[in-house]
């Protein structure tokens, strides 16, 4: 169920949603010998809420924001999914997420328009495999980005320069752990800080 709202002559839009989802035959990846195997061996429930919004306090500034909460848990686990149990945490499912961004038109004149943007996203800690290997636990982290765009007066050409992952945060995206037989644990990490330059043309 949800609710969509607009306030202050449409300068603030606020959407709220709550949900509950039940899952059966959940695919759970576990190790069998030296190879990972997929088991349709679980039932679970995810419930939570999302709040998202947009605001324009003045014509030159636009804000977007959002926050989400998830309560995810197994309601039953088949023995074939061992060592996963009902107490195991869902892989890749953070309890909290949040994001915010601001776009500000800092110049508009005969030459065109200059817009600055900053964005932030947050994710609480998550395990990156179904068996909750401590080697693949990613603590909570934030990622920031920034850019500047210039659009000419005709609004045909736009050049944008910016940076992603501004603080060069390296966080785990996935991996594989087999300490008992293979004696190894591997993980893949996020991309580092990157700079970019884009040129766009609109017909």
Image: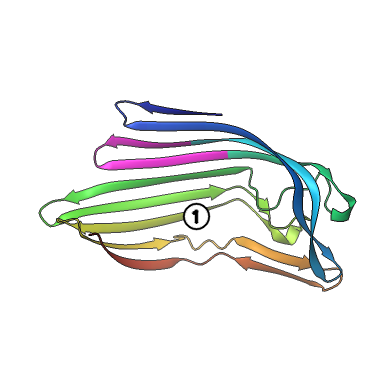
Q: Is residue 60 magenta?
A: yes
Left or right position of 54 against 186: left
Left or right position of 68 against 152: right
**Main secondary structure of the magenta stretch:** strand
The one of 13 and 65 positioned closer to us in this rendering? 13
Q: Circle 1 sits in a helix, a strand or a loop, which is it?
A: strand
Where, by quadrant of the figure, is residue 14 drawn?
Answer: top left
Where, by quadrant of the figure, is residue 6 drawn?
Answer: top left
* Colour mapping: rainbow
Residue 53: % across, % down: 42, 36
The one of 87 and 15 positioned closer to us in this rendering? 15
From which residue to which does the magenta span run? 52-68
> Which residue is found at the position 52% from the left and 43% from the top?
98
> Which residue is found at the position 63% from the left and 47% from the top?
94
Report if residue 82 is visible in the image: no
| Residue at far left of view | 110
Q: Is residue 58 above or below residue 186?
A: above
| Residue at far top of view | 8
Q: Which residue is mark 1?
A: 143
The one of 174 and 184 positioned closer to us in this rendering? 174
Residue 120: % across, % down: 45, 50
Left or right position of 5 against 161: right
């Amino acid at each position: 169920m949800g609710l969509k709202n607009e306030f202050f002559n449409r300068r603030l839009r606020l959407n709220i949603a709550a949900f509950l989802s039940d899952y059966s035959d959940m695919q759970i990846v576990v190790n069998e010998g030296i190879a990972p195997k997929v088991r349709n061996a679980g039932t679970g429930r995810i419930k939570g809420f999302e709040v998202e919004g947009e605001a324009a306090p003045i014509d030159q500034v636009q804000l977007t924001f959002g926050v989400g909460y998830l309560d995810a848990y197994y309601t039953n686990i088949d023995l074939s999914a061992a060592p996963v149990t009902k107490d195991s945490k869902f892989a890749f499912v953070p309890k909290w997420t949040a994001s915010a961004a601001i776009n500000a038109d800092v110049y508009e004149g005969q030459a065109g328009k200059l817009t600055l943007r900053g964005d932030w996203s947050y994710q609480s800690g998550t395990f990156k495999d179904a068996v909750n290997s401590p080697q693949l636990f990613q603590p909570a982290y934030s990622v920031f980005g920034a850019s500047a765009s210039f659009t000419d007066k005709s609004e045909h050409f736009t050049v944008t320069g910016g940076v992603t992952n501004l603080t060069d945060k390296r966080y785990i995206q996935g991996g594989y752990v087999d300490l008992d037989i293979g004696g190894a644990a591997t993980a893949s990490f996020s991309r580092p800080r990157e700079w970019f330059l884009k040129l766009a043309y609109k017909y």
